[in-house]
Amino acid sequence: VNNSARWTTTVLTPPVTGDEPEILISSVLYRGYQLYDEDEAVELINMGPTPGVLSGWSLCKQGSGGIDCWPLPDMVIPPATRSWIARNPAAFERSFGHPPDYAAIGWPRLANDGDEVLLRSPALSYVDTLVYGAGSVDVPGWTGPAVQAYYNNLMGEAGQILARKRDEQDELPLADTDSEADWMQSLADPATGRRALYPGWD
C-alpha cells in the first residue's frame, strides 16, 4: 500500500485502455463498531467473466473543489467474487472476524451523516456510484435520492453495512440501476428491500 498517496482532483487526459473489468461497489461500512470508525471499508465485486485487474483504479468522493480521488491498491478480483478493502485492517478484523482482502491505509474517513463513494477506472470514467445519507446526489453515476440506513426496533445505524440486493439463486447483485433501488436498505421495496446487514452476518 502506498501510504504517501493523497486525495487529488484529477484533470489528466484519460489513457488509452482496453475493455474495462465489470466492477461494482457491492457494500460499504461507513459507521463502524471500532473507535473513530477505524473499521470503515468498501467491498467491490467483479461481475465479469474474467479476473478484474484494478491497477490504476481509484475510489472518489465529492470534495470542496470537485471530485477527489484516492488510488486503490493494486488488486485482482476473480470473476463473481467480492473483495473487501479496509482503511485499517486490524480494526476491520476485530469487527468482521477475518482480515480484509486488501488494505488502503490513509484513506480519508467517510462521513457518518452522508457521503459519496465513486469507483473510477484508469480511463477516468465513473463506473459505479453510491450516495448515502446526506451525501450529494449531484455526482456522476447516480440518480434519485440517496440510500438511507434502515431502522426498526432491532436494527440501528452503527455497524450497518450498505449492501446491494442479491439474486437469491447465485448471490450476485441484481441489475444495476444507479439508484437507491439497488440497495437492500431501500424503503420503497418491501419485498427485497427494508433490510440491514452487519459485520459477522452471513
Image (cartoon, rainbow, N blue to C red):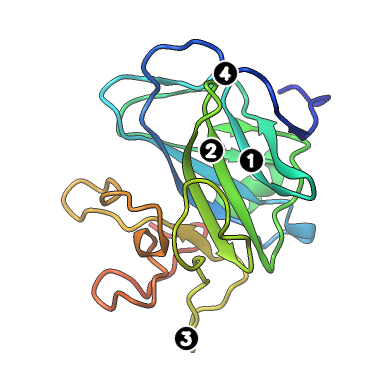
Rounded to the nearest angstrom, the CA distance separating label 1 from label 2 is: 6 Å
User: Is residue 187 shown left or right of residue 153?
Assistant: left
Q: Amino acid at mark 3?
A: Asn
First reached walking from the N terminus: tag 2 or tag 4? 4
Dots 1, 2 in contact, CB < 8 A: yes
Q: Residue 168: where, in percent of width, then height?
A: 20, 56
- Of the two numbered discs 1 and 4 on the same chain, state the one appearing first in sequence: 4
Q: Which residue, given by chain and number where applicable, does mark 2 sit on?
A: 119
Image: 112 above or below 88: below
Query: Which secondary structure, mark 3?
Result: loop
| Type of the residue with mark 1 | Cys
The circle on residue 60 is 1
Q: What SS does tag 4 mark?
A: loop
Residue under label 4, please give it.
14
To which residue does mark 3 refer?
152
Looking at the picture, does residue 53 appear above or below residue 190?
Answer: above
Quarter holding the C terminus is bottom left
Instruction: Decide which of 188, 66 is in the foreground and name it.
Output: 66
